[in-house]
């Protein structure tokens, strides 16, 4: 069997790493070898968002990089499709495996289906219901087309059922990102906080955050692309959150660009209790998450990691495609949107809370093997 798997942007890399390991393990013990081709669309190209994850997670270099780079959504998707179509015609795989919900996921699914290649989507069935999010459109199109839909939780399987997806195409396998978390927990725990802060400093050489700090990340267009939204958020972060505890903020390139555009960068940069960092490697971020008092984030992956680690999390969004991470379902996160009064209230309440780690069903570190087995089973069936 020949499988092409696709990655494009940072959140894809931790999902593909365990899948590749599962293929290697299969090939070691089985005479029925899988030929695997790893394709990177090149949407993320900075070392800190891409290559550093390949090295840290022992992902082999991509066999092919489509070098799509930055651009509008249509440019990224269109350019990926043009290049991926040529590649599929040359390689003729049996399956294309896509993960997550980035532009590569959508572009490669559509292209593969038109080339009559079967598609497996890992992390299928997540739904925020928010059609203003590019990722929701990517999820809907991908899941409508994919032949095999591997879900991280039963709510996602139910979502697909409600949309009329045939049950034979859906398989609940668990959360593949947790395979990566479990495989790397010990390495992360062994890192030095001081080294992470020193080696990734943006605005100051080193500030000892002591033993309590707030961790935040923010990159969604809905939070960073409009001044009316970003400015009050920054005001709250600098004047309230950073007054309680040091605020550690690894800054995504999109957020940095917007802060500069709206003339907010200097205020953040110069604040004595804000520690700005470059985008962090996988282990560094995991280490900071393990020690944080509280997380403020608009990242889906971090909501999940907070749930497993028991880090109280304020999700800076009005909705989530990952309800299993919410406190009402036993998780660590609460939705606070980007309205300051709501964030403030939740922030104060959360600081006083004792959040316990939670392990949803099948978030057990063994999901990748189930994904591969599902593809092997489906090969003759679908
Ligand atoms: C993408 C994903 C999002 C994911 C996020 C994680 C889609 C639709 N969105 O959003 O789901 O949560 O990645 O990071 O696919 N840039 C760099 N260096 C790079 C890559 C990008 O500086 O290596 C800059 C770009 O020029 C652009 C900005 O970062 O200005 C945003 O990059 P883009 O790939 O368009 O989307 P993300 O916001 O990163």
Image (tube, rainbow, N blue to C red):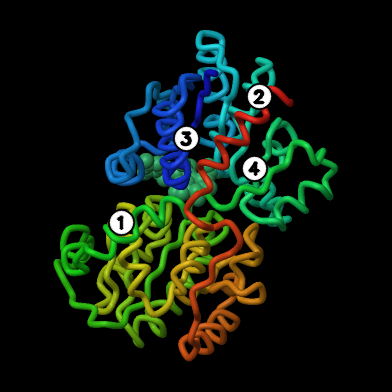
Q: Position of residue 274 (x, y in %)?
A: 29, 74
Q: Name the residue under label 4.
A: 150
Image quadrant of ligand 1 equals: top left
Q: Which residue lies furthest to the top in this view?
A: 90
The answer to whether the beta carbon of the residue marked 2 is less than 8 Å from any atom of ligand 1 is no
Specify few, some or many for label 1: CA neighbours under 10 Å numbering under 14, 14-19, or 20 or more.
many
Q: Residue furthest bottom?
A: 352
Q: Name the residue under label 2.
A: 379
Numbered disc total: 4
Q: Quadrant of residue 342?
A: bottom right
Q: In this view, does 362 lie above or below 137?
A: below
Horizontal side, residue 23 vs residue 238: left or right = right
Secondary structure category for the residue under label 1: helix
**Separation of marks 2 and 4 at Cα, in angstroms:** 14 Å
Q: In this view, does 165 lie above or below 221?
A: above
The mark nearer the N terminus, 1 or 2, is 1
Q: Name the residue under label 1.
A: 283
Q: In which quarter of the image is residue 261?
A: bottom left
Horizontal side, residue 261 vs residue 350: left or right = left
Which label lies toward us, 3 or 1?
Answer: 1
Which label lies toward us, 3 or 4?
Answer: 4
**In which quadrant of the rendered image does the N terminus lie?**
top right
**Separation of marks 1 and 2 at Cα, in angstroms:** 35 Å
The mark nearer the N terminus, 3 or 2, is 3
The mark nearer the N terminus, 3 or 1, is 3
The mark nearer the N terminus, 1 or 4, is 4
Q: Mark 3 points at which residue?
A: 7
The foreground one among 36 and 198 is: 36
């Amino acid at each position: 069997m020949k499988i092409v798997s696709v990655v494009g942007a940072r959140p894809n890399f931790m999902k593909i790493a365990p899948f590749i390991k599962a293929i290697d393990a299969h090939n070691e013990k089985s005479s029925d070898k899988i030929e695997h081709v790893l394709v990177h669309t090149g949407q993320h190209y900075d070392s800190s968002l891409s290559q550093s994850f390949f090295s840290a997670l022992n992902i082999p270099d991509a066999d092919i990089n489509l070098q799509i780079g930055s651009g509008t959504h249509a440019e990224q998707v269109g350019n990926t499709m043009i290049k991926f179509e040529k590649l599929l015609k040359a390689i003729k795989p049996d399956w294309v495996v896509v993960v997550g919900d980035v532009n590569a996921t959508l572009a490669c699914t559509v292209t593969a289906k038109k080339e009559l290649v079967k598609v497996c989507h890992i992390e299928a069935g997540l739904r925020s219901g928010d059609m203003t999010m590019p990722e929701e459109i990517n999820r809907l199109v991908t899941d409508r087309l994919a032949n095999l839909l591997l879900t991280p939780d039963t709510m996602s399987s139910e979502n697909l059922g409600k949309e009329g997806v045939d049950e034979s195409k859906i398989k609940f396998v668990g959360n593949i990102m947790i395979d990566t978390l479990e495989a790397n927990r010990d390495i992360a725990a062994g890192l030095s906080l001081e080294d992470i802060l020193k080696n990734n400093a943006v605005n100051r050489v080193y500030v000892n955050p002591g033993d309590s700090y707030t961790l935040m990340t923010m990159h969604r267009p809905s939070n960073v692309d409009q001044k009316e939204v970003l400015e009050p958020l920054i005001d709250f972060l600098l004047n309230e959150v950073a007054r309680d505890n040091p605020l550690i903020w690894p800054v995504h390139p999109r957020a940095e660009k917007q802060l500069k555009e709206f003339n907010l960068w200097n205020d953040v940069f110069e604040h004595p209790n804000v520690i700005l960092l470059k985008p962090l490697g996988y282990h560094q971020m995991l280490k900071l998450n393990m020690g944080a008092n509280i997380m403020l984030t608009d990242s889906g992956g971090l909501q999940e990691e907070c749930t497993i680690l028991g880090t109280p999390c304020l999700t800076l969004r009005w909705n989530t495609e990952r309800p299993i991470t919410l406190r009402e379902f036993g998780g660590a996160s609460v939705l606070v949107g980007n309205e300051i009064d709501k964030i403030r209230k939740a922030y104060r309440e959360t600081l006083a809370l004792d959040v316990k780690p939670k392990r949803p069903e099948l978030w057990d570190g063994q999901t990748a093997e189930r994904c591969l087995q599902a593809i092997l089973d489906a090969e003759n069936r679908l």
